[in-house]
Image: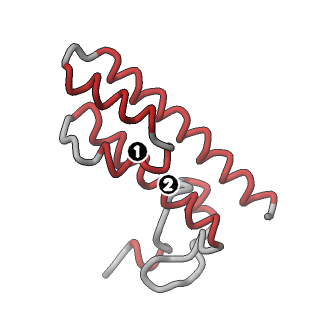
Amino acid sequence: MSIRLNQLRTRLLNEQQLLQQQIMDFLAQQNRVEFQQLELRLMQLTIARWPEVLLQWQTPGLLEVSVRLEAIQAALSQMEIGLYGICCDCEAKIELDRLDADPTEQRCKICSNPR
């Protein structure tokens, strides 16, 4: 694995950990049984399974974080199978400056700016 790819992976893992903590903090602050049950359920799952569970909750405090967590999981999965940095539309390489700006980027510059 290249040094640059390793750095991007580290950024993704760090952000994933931060989001995981934000989610658990949010759930711990809620006084509803449903959120307590969700907190217990998440603690039983690997972080890779969290997005699919969290996206079922349309709670404003969870939705945005859940979507970002899902994007991070997708990028990490792509790294594992060797498809990271490949545009999901045209399969060209995504420009490094785009990945530096957002390591979860899924599209190259051309595909992200349709005419």
Residue 29 x %, y %:
31, 14
Q: Is residue 108 left or right of residue 96?
A: left
* The label number, if any, that marks residue 73 in the structure image: 2
Question: Along the polypeptide, which appears first: circle 2 or circle 1?
Answer: 1
Tags 2 and 1 in contact by the CB under 8 Å rule? yes
**Dot 2 lies on which element?**
helix
Question: Where residue 26 sits in the image (x, y, percent)?
Answer: 34, 23
Residue underneath mark 1: 50
Q: Residue at x 56, y 83 (%)?
A: 92
Image: 63 above or below 95: above
- 91 or 37, which is in the foreground? 37
Q: Nearer the viewer, residue 102 or 88?
A: 88
Residue 4 vertical placement versus 42 (above, below):
below
Mark 2 vs mark 1, CA separation in Å = 9 Å
The C terminus appears in which quarter of the rendering?
Answer: bottom left
Around disc 2, counting alpha carbons within 10 Å, would you say few (fewer than 14), some (14 to 19), or many (20 or more)? many
Q: Amino acid at mark 2?
A: Gln
Q: Is residue 51 left or right of residue 6?
A: left
Q: Position of residue 78 (x, y in %)?
A: 57, 67
**Regarding mark 1 in the picture, which secondary structure is present there?**
helix
Q: Is residue 59 above or below residue 90?
A: above
